[in-house]
Amino acid sequence: MTYDPYNPKQDPYGQPDPYAQQQAYGQQPYGQPGPYGQPAYGAGYGYVQPKSQTNAILALVLSCVGFVTCGVTSIVGVIFGHIAMAKIKRGEEDGHGMAVAGLIVGYVVIAGWLAYAAFIVIAIIAAANQATY
């Protein structure tokens, strides 16, 4: 028997691992095909819980609502978008496209409302300078 350094179950002196789990007679090892080509019990049938997209959804919704609320909720939407992007980067959450869309919409809405406010302020100043008493 040759020594395989990549097999942790093998002793360098050829002795079997005394702590290795023994299979019952006729039982297939976990994940190996059973009789008739069927997967063994428990192999490939696990339920994977989908990752949440709560922060990404909040980012997009609040950024879009900012069109109506003078951009106040867009600021909160941008914050949630950055939180969602951080969680997506760590693998805790899905929804990368929705988070990016929330960030883009949020920044555009904030910039639009700031430009509108600047226009109003400039118009008021110009009107005050034009006033005749």
Image (cartoon, grey):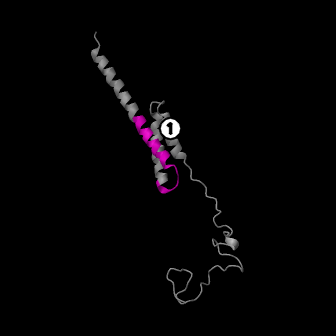
Q: Which residue is mark 1?
A: 62
Q: Residue furthest front?
A: 36
Identify which residue, 65 or 36, lies in the foreground.
Answer: 36
Q: Which residue is drawn at the image coordinates 63% and 64% (left, top)? A: 44
Identify which residue, 30 or 85, lies in the foreground.
Answer: 30
Residue 118, given in percent of the width and then of the height, sits at 34, 28
Compared with 13, 132 (above or below) is: above
Compared with 65, 47 (above or below) is: below
> Seen in the image, is 128 located left or right of residue 76?
left
Residue 123, given in percent of the width and then of the height, sits at 33, 21
Number of residues whose C-alpha sits closer than 10 Å to that of mark 1, classed few (under 14), some (14–19) or many (20 or more):
many
User: Image quarter for residue 20?
Assistant: bottom right
Please tell me whether the stretch drawn in magenta is mainly helix, strand or loop: helix
Q: Which residue is drawn at the image coordinates 71% and 79% (left, top)? A: 26
Q: Quadrant of the C terminus?
A: top left
Magenta region:
89-110
Residue 95, given in percent of the width and then of the height, sits at 51, 49
Compared with 114, 123 (above or below) is: above
* Residue 55 counted in the magenta span: no
Instruction: Name the residue type under label 1.
Output: Leu
Identify which residue, 60 or 41, lies in the foreground.
Answer: 41
Q: Quadrant of the N terminus?
A: bottom right
> Seen in the image, is 40 located left or right of residue 115?
right
Q: Which residue is drawn at the image coordinates 56% and 50% (left, top)? A: 52
> Seen in the image, is 120 located left or right of residue 68?
left
* Residue 109 counted in the magenta span: yes
Residue 91, given in percent of the width and then of the height, sits at 50, 56
Report how many numbered discs are placed on residues in the image: 1
